[in-house]
Amino acid sequence: MEEPYHILAGIECHLGLNGSFMLPTCLCFSSLLVLVILNMMLFYRLWSLEHTARTVESWQTYALSSGKLPQTASEWAEILELQKQFHSVEVQKWKQILKASVELLDEMKLSLEKLQQGIMVAEPPLEPE
């Protein structure tokens, strides 16, 4: 005989022999699934941040190795203005990445708190013998 089940966050949660829903187990698996997805998103954002940093570093190395340095004050001023613009764009990107990372960490914190509450609710109280 096949046990009845419910689907919670893509995970089949089977009913126990007595027909009780195994909520703690399903809650744990669902929370872990959410945490894994959030961790993957955070890892991707950190990887893209490192990739951007490497790209900037290689661009600066290339610019210095080309040997063409500005000769006049106006050329230097133009380069300085370009660097300021580039810097402000990079600062905005860093702010967005940090904001998104903090939001993901907050979501992860909430998920862990819900998981902890679910585990605490699921634990039966100990009866004195």
Image (cartoon, helix red, strand yellow):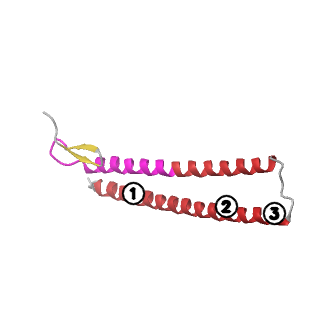
Nearer-N-terminus badge (2/3): 3
Nearer-N-terminus badge (1/2): 2
Which mark is drawn over residue 63?
A: none
- Residue at 76% of width from left, 61% of height from top? 79
Nearer-N-terminus badge (1/3): 3
Up-down: is 99 above or below 63?
A: below
Residue furthest out toward the left: 1
At label 1, the amino acid type is Ser
Q: Which residue is mark 3?
A: 76
Residue bounds of the magenta highlight: 16-42
User: Could you tell me residue 100's position as x and y percent?
Assistant: 50, 60
At label 3, the amino acid type is Trp
Residue furthest out toward the right: 71
- Circle 2 packing at 10 Å, graded few (<14), some (14-19), many (20+), is few
User: For the residue labelled by badge 3, is the local secondary structure a helix, a strand or a loop?
Assistant: helix
From the viewer's perspective, is 118 left or right of 93?
left
Q: In terms of depth relative to the viewer, which is nearer, 124 or 3?
A: 3
2 vs 3, front mark:
3
Q: Which residue is mark 1?
A: 111
At label 2, the amino acid type is Phe
From the viewer's perspective, is 95 left or right of 70?
left
Up-down: is 76 above or below 43?
A: below
- Residue at 39% of width from left, 57% of height from top? 111
- Residue at 24% of width from left, 46% of height from top? 7
From the viewer's perspective, is 93 left or right of 77?
left
- Circle 1 packing at 10 Å, graded few (<14), some (14-19), many (20+), is some
User: Could you tell me residue 24's position as x and y percent?
Assistant: 29, 50
Q: Which residue is mark 2?
A: 86
SS majority, magenta: helix
Q: How far apart, in angstroms, are the residues tagged by discs 1 and 3?
A: 52 Å
